[in-house]
Amino acid sequence: GDTIKLLAIDLGASSGRVMLGIYDGDRLQMEEIHRFDNTPVQINGHLYWDILRLFHEMKQGVQKAFRQHGELTSLSVDTWGVDYGFIDKKGMMLYSPHHYRDRRMEAHRLKLEALLSPAEQFRMTGNQPSMINTVYQLFSDLQDDDSLIETADTILMMPDLFHYLFSGIKAAESTIWSTSGLMDAVTGELSSEVFSRLGIPSRLFPHQVHAGTVIGSILPIIQEELSVGPMKVIAGASHDTASAVASIPYTRKDEAAFISCGTWSLVGMETPEPVISEKSYEYGFTNERCFGNSNRLLKNTTGLWILQELQRNWAKAGEQLSQSEMVELAKTINGAPAIIDPNDQLFSTPGEMVQRIKEYCERTGQQTPNAKAEIIRVILESLALSYCRTIDEMEEITGKTISIIHMVGGGIQNELLCQLTADATGREVIAGPVEASGIGNIIVQLAALGKLEASEGKEFVARSFTFKTYQPSLVKNSKK
Ligand code: ADP
Ligand code: LRH
């Protein structure tokens, strides 16, 4: 009958995956086709995307999907925010895009902020100033390399860049650009005021499209290489967080917050307009675009990153533990001996987490955790408390009451974290879907193809996937 098949290519910090969506007009079924590593590469002290390998893996995924399932209607790529690459006048990529955990921006921060203060950045763009933002990275690139202004023809954010590699079409999709610190919060267009203050030439930016635009088709030469049929290339909600949020099946949207839980934890809520106030700035909130153009007020908080680093630390020392084994360990004890601030600068770069956690606890006069179970429990309880703080702040700056929290993303497989979040916040938690970015990616493609009204997306997710509810176990914290 009317069944169509679409590919969502979702690049997260812990892996990249190609997911097939099978849509029969009523329900969506997702199948993972291909999963690959997404480890940045260090060269001479700098950190880069392994872009050629990633594009290769994406193509492998496309080919595998075609071989297993036949004709595919379309594909769309989503990635994390802020990173980008340059295209030269001949249409070639200039060099491997930098990864935002690179440190080159540190040397240029003060100069940038003298030209455009953090408070002005927030007022103009609604984005929380942060050194990882595109604006800091791009300014640094232009400062570091005088010739770049000559050699670079176009700047493309990472999903736009992959869409270009697939289709040959250059476009600037709004949700991903809304993470850049270069977009006007009110008009939704790239901010000429930011450009002129910082001496960034506006000719670098391609024309803008909204989430849910068919921009082209995969190049004939790629079809030939992979022996696959034609398929459309769609600029979806190409920021992974925008895709994740597009998958949330809200029941009480007015009272709902979300936590998109992966390497990062994005804690926020949808609002009709950007929330740009002294308080939202002071608390560290940012404003980004959603599919359908509403606003997403959120805070980028540390997520399972610390746990992932810990896992790598222990693996290096010869002890292989899976994330679920780590969670099981944490369940063997009751409560954490100490609490850290997961958003402290100390935990933001790769390195020895046990040592840093101990150092933090000593510095703050707390008991130092020793056993593995204690270390893990400290991290998870601290994450839950950090979510709670952010949600309370959000109530304060929006004047709304939040009674329900939707948790989505890979991190919700950590059921202890979901329960601790319900407990710490005193609010009901609805967990699901796990593959939120992939599902949201497909929903936006379906809308772009005219198969689904944007407003139907959410009910249809509720029909297609299963969810788990967590009630706060401490009655005294309970909020209605
Ligand atoms: P990202 O998009 O940032 O790559 P994901 O949304 O894929 O992240 O989430 C990955 C994280 O989910 C892992 O780092 C891990 O912490 C958590 N996770 C995945 N599977 C499990 C599991 N079985 N048990 C507990 N946690 C898990
Ligand atoms: C989450 C995310 C987040 C930020 C960060 C850089 O994966 O996209 O919204 O933009 O990565």
Image (cartoon, rainbow, N blue to C red):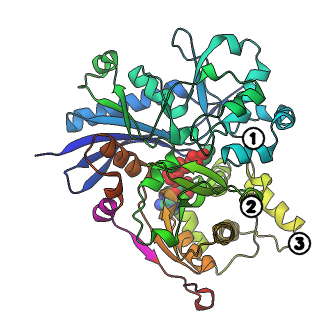
Q: Report which residue position mark 3 lands on.
A: 365
Q: Amino acid at mark 3?
A: Gly
Please report contact status of discs 2 and 3: CB closer than 8 Å, yes or no: no
Tag 3 or tag 1, which sits nearer the N-term?
Answer: 1
Residue 22 coordinates in the image, percent (x, y): 25, 47
Which residue carries the number 2 mark?
Answer: 283
Sooner in the amino-acid sequence: mark 2 or mark 1: 1
- Decide: is 265 above or below 3: below
Question: Which of pointers 2 and 3 lies earlier in the amino acid sequence?
Answer: 2
Q: Quadrant of residue 201?
A: top right
Q: CA distance from mark 2 to mark 1?
A: 17 Å
Residue visible at 29% across and 21% down?
223
Magenta highlight range: 459-469
Where does the image place residue 16, in percent across and percent down from the top left?
A: 47, 41
Q: Nearer the viewer, mark 2 or mark 1?
A: 2
Front-most of residues 407 and 312: 407
Image coords of residue 281 (percent x, y): 74, 56
Secondary structure under badge 3? loop
Counting labels gives 3
Foreground pick, 115 / 407? 115
Kindly check if marks 2 and 1 are in contact, taking CB atoms under 8 A apart as contact: no
Do the CB atoms of the residues marked 1 and 3 lie less than 8 Å apart?
no
Image quadrant assignment for residue 432? bottom left
Q: Amino acid at mark 1?
A: Met
- Is residue 261 among what the camera can see? yes
Mark 2 is surrounded, within 10 Å at the Cα level, by few (under 14), some (14 to 19) or many (20 or more) other residues, namely some
Q: Seen from this angle, which residue lies furthest left?
A: 1
Tell me the distance, in whole angstroms, between the alpha carbons under discs 2 and 3. Answer: 25 Å
Check the picture and name the quadrant holding the C terminus. bottom right
Q: Secondary structure at mark 1?
A: loop
- The amino acid on which the numbered mark 2 sits, given as a three-letter code, is Tyr
On the image, numbered disc 1 is attached to which residue?
131
